[in-house]
Image: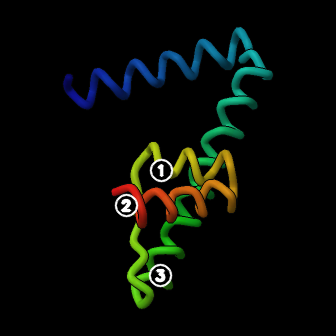
Amino acid sequence: MDPIVVISIFSGLILIMLFIGAPVKPLRFIGQGVVKILIGALFLFFLNEFGTSLGIYVPINLVTASVSGLLGLPGVAALIAIETWII
């Protein structure tokens, strides 16, 4: 698709949401999920930065960021264990 078409579709959706109103609860749930995934990616980034001297490296992708973001530090520990012993 052309960028003009995409921008005009998003602009139209924003205008519709301004006039009608957005459902608050689903947007809040989606926003919290996105923030948790970003925090998980940040956890993995710091793990990779400080863990390379110990030979620990976990790739950062949507699945690993989701696991580490939703489960927190136990999720990061599980990813390290999976990367070390299984893969």
Marks 1 and 2: in contact by CB < 8 Å?
A: yes
The quadrant of the rendering that contains the C terminus is: bottom left
SS state under label 2: loop
- Mark 2 or mark 3: which comes first in sequence? 3
Residue 50, labelled with which disc? Answer: none
- Residue type at the position of mark 3: Gly
SS state under label 3: helix
| Residue located 51% across and 51% down the image | 65
**79 shown above or below 2:** below
Residue 51, labelled with which disc? Answer: 3
**32 shown above or below 15:** below
Residue 59, labelled with which disc? Answer: 2
| Residue located 42% across and 76% down the image | 56
| Residue located 75% across and 16% down the image | 23
- Mark 2 or mark 1: which comes first in sequence? 2
Residue found farthest to the top: 20
Q: CA distance from mark 2 to mark 1?
A: 7 Å
| Location of mark 1 (residue) | 64
